[in-house]
Image: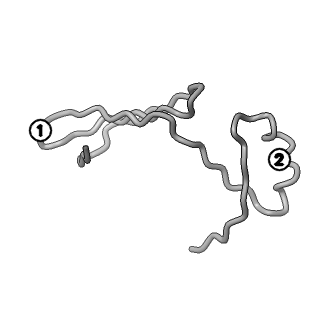
Amino acid sequence: MIASGLILSRHWQDTGEGQLLEFWLATQAGPLRVQLEGQESVLFVPADRLKPAGKVLQGQLNYRHREVDLRC
């Protein structure tokens, strides 16, 4: 199902299966709650800080990293 509307509120919660994202939308059909389960967290770290950040993150569930080129 694809829903479109104005986002009224958002909430996230960490779970054992990833993040649970919840949105309330104002749609033409009235208020609508949308939940997305098992979502992955994303963190951007400058390349020169990756080694110290890795020491902190290594204990996290399913931690992984890769370099990407960011553009404006």
Residue at x-position 24% and y-position 48%: 4
What residue is pinned by disc 1?
Answer: 29
Q: Nearer the viewer, mark 1 or mark 2?
A: 2
Q: Is residue 72 left or right of residue 49?
A: left
Dividing the picture into quarters, in which one does residue 33 lie? top left
Quarter of the picture holding the C terminus: bottom right
Q: Earlier in the sequence, mark 1 or mark 2?
A: 1
The residue under label 2 is: 54
| Apparent side of residue 7 relative to residue 63 in the rendered image (left or right) | left
Distance between the Cα atoms at labels 1 and 2?
46 Å
Sort mark 2 into few (<14), some (14-19) or many (20+) by Cα contacts within 10 Å: some
Provide residue 64's location: percent of width, then percent of height: 72, 48
Q: Amino acid at mark 1?
A: Ala
Q: Position of residue 16 (x, y in %)?
A: 60, 25
Q: Residue at x 74, y 35 (%)?
A: 60
Q: Amino acid at mark 2?
A: Gly
Who is closer to the viewer here, 53 or 61?
A: 61
Q: In the orientation shown, which residue stands out farthest toward the top?
A: 16
Assess disc 1: are there few (<14), some (14-19) or many (≥20) residues with their C-alpha within 10 Å of its C-alpha. few
Marks counted in the figure total 2
Instruction: Give me the residue at 18% from left, 42% from top.
Output: 27
Q: Nearer the viewer, residue 41 or 1?
A: 1
**In the shown orientation, is residue 37 left or right of residue 34?**
right
